[in-house]
Image (tube, grey):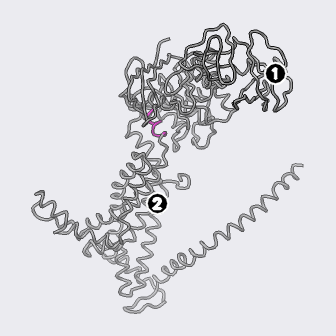
Amino acid sequence: MSAVLDLSNVRKTYGALNALDGLDLTLPDNAYVALLGPSGSGKTTLLRVIAGFETPDAGSLTFKGNRIEGVAPHRRDIGFVFQNFALFPHLSVAKNIAFGLEHRDIDPVTDPKILHTRVKDMVALVGLDGLEERAVTQISGGQRQRVALARTLITEPSLVLLDEPLGALDANLRGRMRLELRAIRERCGVTFLHVTGSESEALAMGDLVLVLDQGKIAQAADADTVYNQPKSPAVARFLNCYNLFDGTLSGNGFVNPLATFPLGGAIPRQSGQPGYAIRYDRIAVRPLDEAVANDEVRLEATFVADEYSGAAINSFFALDDGRVFEVESHLSQTVPAALQPQSRYALVWKRDDALVYA
Amino acid sequence: MTIIAETASRAPPAVAAKKVSDKTLWLLAPGLLWMLLFLVVPMLMMVYVSFWTQTTFKISPILTVQSWVTFFTSETYLSALWTTVRIWLIVLVTTLLVGYPAALYVGLFVRNKTTQTVLLVFCVIPFWTSFLIRVLAWRPMLGKEGAINLILQALGIINTPIEVLLFSELSVIIGMTQIYCVFMVGPIAFMMGRIDQSVIEAAQDMGAGFWRIFRTIILPLTMPGVVVGAIFVSVMVLGEFATAAALSGRKVNLLGNIIVTQVGSLKWAFAAVVGVVLTILMGIVVAALLRVVDLRKAL
C-alpha cells in the first residue's frame, strides 16, 4: 500500500498549549483510518491542519507526493466532512451536493446535464433517492450526514477527513452509519480519516487505528493490536477496558502503593512511563478465603455496584486508595455469583494477562 | 371505536385552543388598541382631511378632490415626487455600497467578538449627537471654504473650490448616506454573524474561491439583512426633510419639505394629500422589498 498523506514533525501551538507536538503520521492509500483521541488531544487541530484551515508552525505535509503546507484549502483535493455537517442552509439537497462540482475554481462542471447525472449517481451512492429537492432543513440528522458526505465525495478527493461524523447522530443511527460509511468508502476507493473520541467506534471502523495523545501519534496499528497490546498506559486508558496502576518495576514485581504485583514471564514493554494494566474481562471475583494459584495475582477490594448490559455485567469495586476498579463478566461464559454491596472480595487475574510497561 | 377515539381526541384540543385564543386576545389587546388609536385612526383621518375644502386660511369639511387635482397637475409637486424617489434610490444604493463591505468586514473577517462589538459601537457613536447637529456639521465640511475644499486646495489638487459640494443634491446625498448608513450595516452585520464559520470553510474545502463563496453563500444568506436594512433606510429617507432643508439651500424639495411648508402655511388639506401619497409610496416600497426575501423563513 502506498502512502497518500505523510506528515512529518508537524507542530502547532496556541499560546502555551502544544496542540500538535512534533507529530509524524502516514496514511495509506485506499483505507479506512480511524483516529482515536480524547477531547483536547489535538485531533480537530490535526484535521484542520491537513485540510488547510490552520497553518502548522513547523513540519511538512506531503500529499500524493507534493508538499502542501502553503496550498489554500480549496486547492488541496482533500475533502472535509464537518462535525455539524455545515450544510448550506439556503440550498436544496441536490444543490448542496452539486456545489463542489459547480463552483470549484479548478475545472468546474458547467454542463447541467453532466452535473445532473453526477448528482444523481452520488445521491444513489449515499442512499438519498427522492430527497433531491428537499431543503436541508427539512431532512433528518442521518440524511443530513449523508448530504454532507455526498457533497464532499462528489468532487472525488483522494482523502476525506471526517471530524466526529457520527457524534451528532443518535445511538441507533450511529450503528447503521458505521457500516454505511465503510461501504461507501469501499465503493469510492479513497482514504477516509475518521476522527472520533469513541474507542468502540475507532476499533470497529478503522482498518488502521491511530491513537493521538498529547499532540503525537501514540500508536498506529490494526484494531486487534491496539486493543490487545496498547503501546503505553495512556493508550490503554483511552481504550476504556483496562484497569491501570501507576508504580515502579522492581525485580520481579510491579510496586504500587496498594500492593506489589508479581510479574509473569513476559518482558515489560518500553513506553517511557511505567504502568500496569489488566483488562476488565480478564479478572475473576472470588470470596476472600479462596486459594490463589501460583501464576495468579490477587488484590482485595470493596464491591460497590454493578451494571447489567445484556451480554455482560460490569462490576465496580473501590480499591483501598479510593480508585474504581472495573470487572467485566461475559454472561455467555459464566454466570457470576451475586455480590454483596460494601463487602470485600478478592480480585484475581493471571500474571501473564497483565500488560506491564517500563 | 374509531368514532369514539376521534371525538375523544378532538374534544380536548378544542378546549385548549379556546384557552390559548383567550390568552392571545388579552396579550394582543394593548398593542391593537394602541395601533388603532394612534395609527389607523390618524391615517383614516389624514385620508379624510385630504378631501376637505381648503381656502386661504380656513379648512372646511366639504368634500372635494381639489387638493388632489392640484397635486397631480402641478409641475412643482410632481417634480418633488420624482426628486424624492430619485434621492431615495440613490441613497439606498450608496448606503448599500458603503454599508455592505463594512458589515462583511465586521461580521465575517473580525473573528474576535469583542472587537466586533467595539467596531459596531463605533458605527453608532455619531448617533449620540443630535440629528440636526450631525446634519449641520456637514456645512463646514463641504462648504466653499470648508474642510474638504481647503485640504484639496492646500494639496494643490484643485485651484478653485468645488462649489457643487454644498447646497446641491450631492450634499444631500452625502449627508443622508452618512446618517442612514448604520441602519444598513446593523442588520447585515447581524446576518453575517449568524453564518456558521464552518459553512464557509466547507465551501472553501469543496474548491470554491472567495468571490464564488461570496456570490453563492454569503450574499444569499445575508439577503434578509439587506432587505431589513433597505426597509429602514427607505422609510427614513422617504420621510426626510431636515437634511434636504439644511444641506440643499432649498434647491432640493422632497415631499417631506412640501408637507412642512404646507403645514406652516396652514394648508392642511394639501399637506394631507402629500402625506397620503408618501404613505402609499412607502407601502409599495416596503411590500416590494418584502417580496425579495421571505423574512419569516429566513429569520
Q: In terms of depth relative to the viewer, which is nearer, A334 or A194?
A: A334
Percent coordinates x, y for residue B76 in the rendering: 31, 76
Give the SS element for disc 1. loop
Q: In terms of depth relative to the viewer, which is nearer, A47 or B202?
A: A47
Q: Which mark is residue B288?
A: 2
Q: Is residue B215 above or below residue B234?
A: above
Q: How would you classify the magenta stretch by its main secondary structure? A: helix
Whether residue A96 appears in magenta in the rendering, the answer is no
Percent coordinates x, y for residue B280 in the rendering: 46, 70
Residue B137, quarter of picture: bottom left
Q: Are marks 2 and 1 on the same chain?
A: no
Q: Residue furthest top?
A: A265
Q: Residue at x 54, y 79 (%)?
A: B41
Percent coordinates x, y for residue B118 in the rendering: 40, 55
Q: In terms of depth relative to the viewer, which is nearer, B270 or A350?
A: A350
Crowd around label 2: few <14 · some 14–19 · many ≥20 (10 Å) = few
Q: Is residue A244 above or below residue A305?
A: above
Provide the chain ID for the residue under circle 2: B
Q: Is residue B79 visible?
A: no
**Residue under circle 1?**
A331
Q: How many marks?
A: 2
Give the SS element for disc 2. helix
Q: Residue furthest right?
A: B1
Q: Which mark is residue A207?
A: none
Q: Give the Cα distance between marks 2 and 1.
A: 71 Å
Q: Left or right? Give the position of A59 relative to B167.
A: right
Q: Which residues are magenta?
A: B198-205
